[in-house]
Amino acid sequence: MQEEDGKPLLIASQHEPCGLFSTVGVENPSKLQGTFRGSYLMVLIGHDAVGERLVECGLDTLPIGVVTGDDLVERARNNKNSEFKHFDTGKSLGERAGRTVSANAYLGAQPIFQALQEGSRIVITGRVADASLTVGPLMYHYGWDWEDWNRVAAASVAGHLIECGAQVTGGYRTDWRDCALPKIGYPIVEVDEQGQLVVTKPEGSGGSVTRQSVIEQIVYEIGDPAAYITPDVVVDFTSLEVAALGDDRVAVRGATGNPRPEMLKVSLAYTDGYQASGQLLVYGRDCIVKARIVADLITERLSQEGMQPEKINVELLGAGDGVPGLTPPPTDLHEVVLRISAFDHQRETLEAFSKQFAPLITNGPAGLAGYAQGRPVMRTTYSYWPTTVSRDEITSACKVQTAAEWKQQGTSDTT
Amino acid sequence: MMKDACYLGSIATARSGDKGNHANVAVVARCQASYRYLEQVLTAERVATFFESLDISSVERFELPKIGSLNFLLLDALAGGASRSLRIDTQGKLLGTAILELKLPTPNNLGEMRAIDY
């Protein structure tokens, strides 16, 4: 999806019952502005802004459905009943509750389905599982039973396969050299009424769809493959069979599923101190030793100021630290990037850390470069707290209005 | 050291990603013979030893024989996970490429395993 004259190309669903389904994964909410543009940004800035853009495109009457009910931030902040236990450790949220910045339940596909049934041509939803973006439209199109778990599983597998875009058409592939990456095609998944899938890509596009590219995406970011939990169904990936059909077409069959879970996953984030990372290029045949000395210099000077960050991480990039400890540094290296990162709950400590880099120009060793990048940027650390909530405590709502009505509502909300 | 070793990357591909503070590293055999061999030798223990330096608390292995894949869940592998790790690879994206360097005893039918039979 690209912008053209500042107008996003989000108008594909004007006449045909097709849609654009897209997710935005965010690890640092403060970075949102400016990072995502065009149609992604529209989702982030809200439905009234989408309405406004569509009206600009002359699509005043296009119905937009907005699904809400996922947002639990207020409830998490006032967490009086020790809810929201960490689902790995079982710990209570405790005093972290007050520092919660976001808490969203994964709603699933049913509200999307409802929005489509009520005539929406574009659906903007709060948090759902990525796969639900595909499950909702498929349930709407085929009218499958929500308890036909194998069909819902097939729809979820279809969603899982395309949710990372070109990762199934050659991106991130081990055999990436076999793919033409410059004009990589985004995936198409064809789903028939029996729940059989074919993964392919637009004719003439780059990339490739092979058995290997599809399987690598099936197993991407999964835990127990026999129980891949979504709000809509628990999918069993071990029953899947994959067969290449040729011409960038790969069949995926045999999806099976089990009843959806009673508890919904909640993704919660809270502020948890500050962090910053700085990098310098260290040059010379002694670069590895020198880089370590520079890292020590920084911590030594910090401690002279009475500052000791709670965590410091030193990485020599180019010497094997991408996966720490796996490969020994080479002996004949002539340059290496020193990356030094710090974390502390106190802002002052991180400010002091960030100020250690520039002085190295004049009072550090010879053979350092990279100061022009400026002082390392300090950012708030958000810690992730995966938890659950009972399904019957969540009330999702869906409202469908035309673009013009959303625009109008946006205007009256702000005035 | 193994006298006669082959790299995992010569008979399989891999992909990794994050699940909170855990990482998953999935190994996809290039052919059925390769999968049968990996099922025997690529144990959770071997993978845990290979990634020992990451301070993983444990490794779980899951099998997907129909698609020739083994999924390894590396618990607590990501030094805090995507939002707070101080590492450059906050999400374990490099682990898939890294595991291809794991050395295994050379199987008798290595030639057969390099051929893609799917």
Image (tube, rainbow, N blue to C red):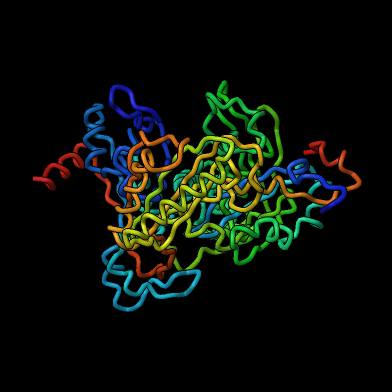
Work out which residue is located at the far right of the displayed protein and give it.
B108
Q: Is residue A109 left or right of residue A334?
A: left
Q: Is residue A51 left or right of residue A255?
A: left
The residue that appears at 31% across and 46% down in the rendered structure is A65
Work out which residue is located at the far left of the displayed protein and give it.
A415
| Picture quadrant where residue A275 is located | bottom left
The residue that appears at 51% across and 45% down in the rendered structure is A291
Please state the horizontal and vertical placement of residue A259, each as a whole percent of the image: 55, 64
- The answer to whether one can see residue A143 in this image is no
Please state which of residues A350 and A403 is positioned toward the viewer in this rendering. A350
Please state which of residues A34 and A398 is positioned toward the viewer in this rendering. A34
Please give the count of numbered marks on the rendered protein: 0
In the rendered image, the quadrant that contains the C terminus of chain A is top left
As drawn, A168 above or below A99 = above
Q: Is residue B89 left or right of residue B15?
A: left
The residue that appears at 19% across and 41% down in the rendered structure is A405
In the rendered image, the quadrant that contains the N terminus of chain A is top left
- The answer to whether one can see residue A2 in this image is yes
The residue that appears at 18% across and 39% down in the rendered structure is A407
As drawn, A285 above or below A394 = above
Please state the horizontal and vertical placement of residue A186, each as a whole percent of the image: 52, 32
Please state the horizontal and vertical placement of residue A48, each as a whole percent of the image: 22, 42
Please state the horizontal and vertical placement of residue A272, each as a whole percent of the image: 35, 62
| Picture quadrant where residue A258 is located | bottom right
Work out which residue is located at the far bottom of the displayed protein and give it.
A81
As drawn, A149 above or below A88 = above
